[in-house]
Image (spheres, grey):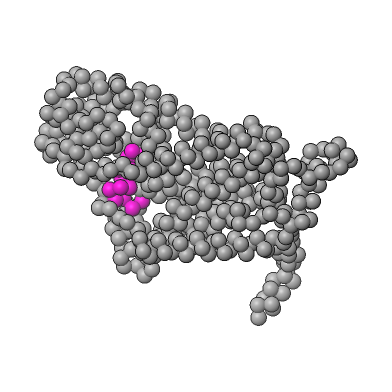
Amino acid sequence: MWRRLVSWVDERLNIMPLWHGFLDRKVPKGIGWFHVFGSATLFLLLVQFATGIFLTVYYAPSTEHAYHSIEFITDQVPFGKYVAGVHLWSASMLVIVIGVHMLRTFVYGAYKYPRETTWITGVVLLFVVLAFAFTGYLLPYDQKAYWATVVGTNIAGAAPVVGDWALRILRGGTTVGVLTLQRFYAFHIWVLPAVLVLFVAAHLFMVIRQGIAAPPRRRPLDLGPAGATLPRREQYERQYAMEKQAGHPFYISILKDAVFALVLFLAVSALAVTVGTPLEPPADPNATSYVPRPEWYFLDFFQLLWYLQGQWEPLWIFLIVLGVLLALLLLPFYDRAPERHPQRRPFAMACAAVGIIGVLGLTYLGGRKPAATQAPPAPSAATAPGAREFQAQGCAGCHTIGGVGGTVGPNLSHIGGAMTRDQLRTFITQGRGGMPAFPQLPPAVLNALVDYLESLK
């Protein structure tokens, strides 16, 4: 029956030559287990799409119902807890896999001629995946999601020139609320998927059209005297044809990809069953004791910001993000040397090692920060608005009050007895001694903050 069906379709569309040309085509020798991360990225993206569609059937993108809809999915929908867990943990796994895939591409020098555009689309996909992680973070609308989004959007709003515009685009106003959740939901299920599909299609087309890059050799293949005078493109095509002669059919690589995808799926399923989807209490914009912490894949960036405190912090944030983006996008154009073997690129390998150690080190330092356990002093009715603004502006991420809060900035438990009202106002708006400036705060917010800090004696 299966053969009849295939024969019926092939008789009308003539697809078998294309199918055999895709599976039977040769790939260069040495394409093995180190090359499975690209297909694993595609597999995890498909898992995200499938589980995401399932979740949207039951999810309600409103501040009143978002949290309870997640509870309904995990508690009452058949297989809902499993699907939600797979969606959550495959997202974390996706960040790891796409990072390793790009690292392997960098180490093998596979971003060089003629694959510059393939690398560029891959960089765009990396940032799209991170944008997925950021926008999906708010959707459960629990305490962790809410306050981490407050801090994250504050960082975006700190960018020079475009900060206020970015903050209003993300939040839909001055605070995180109904419009913020709806916008993040729209970005997560409509805007970003459209961008993702476009760039995945372009990336796959380039990979198939150009072929999988052969593992680097210490010395390039000898094309003989005649080959040395050929144009660059013809030299590359001859070398690549020689690489494929000693290679193997593509379906062998697909088998390895399938085995690795199965291992990933089993690992994600195990995490979904054993760990599930941790959910904190519902988001409370009036909470004054919650210390926001990001997910693990943003810990390195948040930890880095602790070392950049001061009046120039917004500029540093902007330059770091822009610098990383441009450094990755333009890599094939400022590293145009033909050498691809890691041993012939010591400076590039040293940069990769520094980057890996930096990311892992900052992630470790950000993850080991102890959580505060003591309760802060209860604000009076007069200072309660200021206590809420203290939390809403992300101040608790750096400063401790009553044992609750971050440890990077000074302890403010008794700041009202050490500084006058005017000094507090100047300290907030102009910054001093590592404290970033917040000159854009509305007068009502600034006055509430000063009232609250002045009461801490």
Quarter of the image with the C terminus in it = top left
Q: Quadrant of the rendered structure where residue 434 is? A: top left
Note whether 179 is above or below 14 in the view shown.
Answer: above
Magenta-colored stretch includes residue 146: yes
Label count reads 0
The x, y position of residue 49, in whole percent, is 49, 57
For the residue pair 166 and 269, the one nearer the viewer reads as 269
Left or right of 38? Residue 273 is left
Q: Quadrant of the rendered structure where residue 51 is? A: bottom left
Left or right of 299? Residue 103 is right
> Which residue is situated farthest in the bottom direction here?
1
Query: Does residue 168 appear anywhere in the picture?
Result: no
Question: Which SS type dominates the magenta stretch?
Answer: helix
> Which residue is situated farthest in the right direction here?
226
Left or right of 250? Residue 120 is left
* Residue numbers of the magenta segment: 139-152
Q: Residue at x 86, y 42 (%)?
A: 224
For the residue pair 393 and 343, the one nearer the viewer reads as 343
The x, y position of residue 177, in whole percent, is 30, 43
Note whether 434 is above or below 127 in the view shown.
Answer: above
The x, y position of residue 118, in whole percent, is 64, 44
Query: Does residue 364 appear anywhere in the picture?
Result: yes
Quarter of the image with the N terminus in it = bottom right
Q: Residue at x 82, y 38 (%)?
A: 231
The x, y position of residue 322, in whole percent, is 50, 32
Q: Residue at x 78, y 41 (%)?
A: 233
Q: Residue at x 67, y 76 (%)?
A: 5
